[in-house]
Amino acid sequence: MAEAMKIRADMVGTLAKVKCIINHPMETGLRKDKTGQAIRAHYITHVGASLNGVSVMDGQVGSGLSRNPFLMLWIQGAKSGDTINVNWVDNTGDHNSAETVIA
Amino acid sequence: MNKTRRKLLIGAGAAGAFTIATAAGLTQSGAAHASGSTANDFGVNDFETMLNDLGGVNAQSSNGINITVPDVAEQGAIVPIEIYSQIPGSESIAILVEKNAIPVVARFEFKNGGVARVATRIKLAESSPVHVVVRAAGKHYRATKFVKAVIGGCGDEDFGSAMKSNSKT
């Protein structure tokens, strides 16, 4: 099971600003360990964000994102009290999501 | 299959298409994982082909795309980047690092009030131009910034220790 995510959303002017950190190794499959064995690829393939259940962002991502990916998004037409959800799926089928209410 | 899937994503961006793509992605990358091969959900690893597939080859260069990224990245593994497209009707942002083994880092689609602005952290294998391709109202725009990496962030076995020694200094 995936580790917990961190998510936070605030209103900045008329926009909602969402910050999110996903705990994930983001292994490219190119790195080798000390014995010369390739470390298996393990990275996030999709991230998505939704506002009150309506998708606002779909992202196809690859192993080029840093380990423990950080993501910051801005959403128009949101208001304090709305629910933001960020979810991801990785190449092993593992997935997780986190939800927060805009402060 | 991969190529079809990517075209599907680029062309449609519809919720339905995305679901199919996700399912396809899972089976494909699951196989890649099992065989221990270098996984890549964007299909090919060739930069020019990827740029072409994302519509970046004939894209107009634009000043409406703001890329905030350090000129010199001390750690190639963690390079903060923020992209803000001020082009009206911006629908998607794609990030490509030319010199990475897998050049496409991410492609984000925005809709229903999602602003075409994203901040994240990317890996740089070595000093490389970072290209951003934005699709706005069916047209493609492109902006590029060169980032110098002091320590590369991919494939380095001793990267962990390098990171520690670097943080002490």
Image: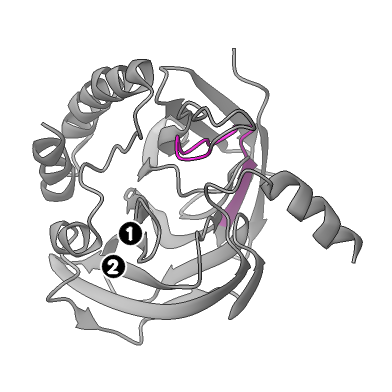
Query: Is residue B127 within the magenta segment?
Result: no
Image x and y of residue B140, in percent: 18, 70
Of the numbered discs in the image, which one, if any, rests on residue B94?
A: 1
Q: Are marks 2 and 1 in contact (CB under 8 Å)?
A: yes
Q: Where is residue B38 in the image (x, y as percent from the top left)?
A: 35, 35
Instruction: Farthest residue to the front: give it.
Output: A35
**Chain identifier of the residue bearing label 1 in the image:** B
The picture places residue B27, in percent across and down from the top left corner, at 25, 17
Q: What element carries label 2?
A: strand
Judged left or right of residue A16, residue A44 is: left
Q: In this view, does B134 lie to the left or right of A51?
A: left
Residue occupying image coordinates x 52% and y 29%: A39
Name the foreground residue: B75 vs B165.
Answer: B165
Image coloring type: one colour
Q: In front: B152, or B133?
A: B152
Q: Mark 2 points at which residue?
A: B133
Residue at 26% of width from left, 50% of height from top? B45
Task: Locate the C terminus of chain A by quadrant.
Answer: top right
Main SS, magenta region, reads: loop
- The quarter of the picture where residue A57 lies is top left
Instruction: Tell which residue pokes out farthest to the bottom in this image.
Output: B63
Q: 10 Å neighbourhood of mark 1: few (<14), some, or many (≥20)?
A: many
* A97 vs B114: above or below: above
- Quarter-wise, where is residue B42 in the image? top left
Please name whichever residue, B146 or B143, is drawn nearer the observer in this view of the structure: B146
Numbered badge on residue A29? none
Q: Is residue A27 magenta?
A: yes
Q: Is residue A53 placed above or below B109 in the rendered structure?
A: above
Relative to residue B47, is residue A61 drawn left or right?
Answer: right
Look at the numbered disc 1 and give the secondary structure of its residue: strand
Residue range corresponding to the magenta coloring: A16-31
Give the amino acid at mark 1: Ala
